[in-house]
Image: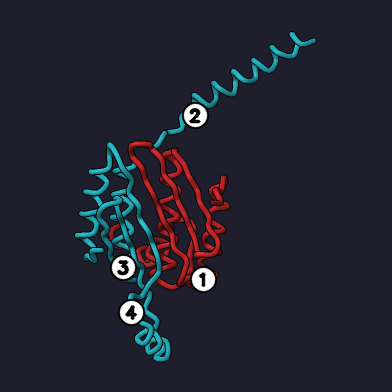
């Protein structure tokens, strides 16, 4: 499990998407975690400071990378992450409204045609 | 595995799940380019909600959900989450209107 800084993490994530174009999956997990031991957490809770960090992990089944994002970096990470996803999720189907309308019209016509035949 | 068919229901239940137990709730995304499939999972290790799709329009909706989760996780579960993306810009606009010298 490799813990990286934000930018290297994004670069590695991009290369994972590129490697799995023909075969394989990419898993990305998001979880809130301050990455500290119980003692430190108890001290922090008593002191009144609760620092929130988001742990982000990514794997392609073979290699796992991770990074931790705090409130300051999360906006920047969010934007870069969204860009990477948009760029790589090209295999999803685009719903064409024209096809849907044609299918709906065809179904209606078949429905009307069937009824008189049965009668 | 509980697959939810309605996107809005999935979003509402996942946010509820997170707010109920922020320390053990996690959000997992699996994307397979070769199959053209995207699967989302939100679980707190007791209950599991899943959503699968092969539609490009759902990828856009997922991005908004990503933003919601990032905000909740990085800023704390009580953070004000507006499901519309116009959260930060709304704060910035009033200050810009105040100056208006370039007109």
In the rendered image of this protein, which colour is used for chain B? red
Query: Which residue bears the numbered disc 4?
Result: A36
Q: Compare residues B81 and B97 and report the one nearer the observer.
A: B81
Tell me the mark number nearer the camera, choosing from 3 and 4: 4
Tell me the mark number nearer the camera, choosing from 2 and 3: 3
- Disc 2 versus disc 3: distance between alpha carbons? 39 Å
- Residue occupying image coordinates x 41% and y 65%: B71
Q: Which one is earlier in the sequence, the residue at label 3 or at label 4?
A: 4
Up-down relation of residue B35 to residue A7 (above or below): above
Query: Which residue bears the numbered disc 2?
Result: A97
- Disc 1 versus disc 2: distance between alpha carbons? 40 Å
Query: Which residue bears the numbered disc 3?
Result: A69
- Residue occupying image coordinates x 41% and y 88%: A48
Helix, strand or loop status at disc 1 = loop
Q: Do discs 1 and 2 share a chain? A: no
Which chain is cyan in the picture?
A: A
- Disc 4 versus disc 2: distance between alpha carbons? 50 Å
Q: Are marks 3 and 4 in contact (CB under 8 Å)?
A: no
- Disc 3 versus disc 4: distance between alpha carbons? 14 Å
Q: Which one is earlier in the sequence, the residue at label 2 or at label 3?
A: 3
């Amino acid at each position: 499990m490799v813990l990286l800084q934000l930018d290297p993490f994004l670069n590695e994530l991009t290369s994972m998407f590129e490697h799995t174009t023909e075969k394989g999956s990419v898993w990305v997990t998001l979880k809130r975690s301050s990455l500290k031991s119980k003692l430190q957490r108890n001290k922090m809770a008593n002191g009144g400071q609760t620092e929130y960090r988001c742990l982000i992990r990514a794997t392609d089944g073979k290699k796992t990378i991770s990074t931790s994002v705090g409130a300051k970096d999360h906006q920047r990470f969010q934007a870069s992450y969204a860009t990477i996803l948009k760029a790589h999720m090209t295999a999803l189907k685009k719903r064409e409204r024209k096809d849907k309308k044609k299918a709906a019209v065809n179904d209606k016509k078949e429905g009307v045609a069937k009824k008189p035949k049965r009668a | 595995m509980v697959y939810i068919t309605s996107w809005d229901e999935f979003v509402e239940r996942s946010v509820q799940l997170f707010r109920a137990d922020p320390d053990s709730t996690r959000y997992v995304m699996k994307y397979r380019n070769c199959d053209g499939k995207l699967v989302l999972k939100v679980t707190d290790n007791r209950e599991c909600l899943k959503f699968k799709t092969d539609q490009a329009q759902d990828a856009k909706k997922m991005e908004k959900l990503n933003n919601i989760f990032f905000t909740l996780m990085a800023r704390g579960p009580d953070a004000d989450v507006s499901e519309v993306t116009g959260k930060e810009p709304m704060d910035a606009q009033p200050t810009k209107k105040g100056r208006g010298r370039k007109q």
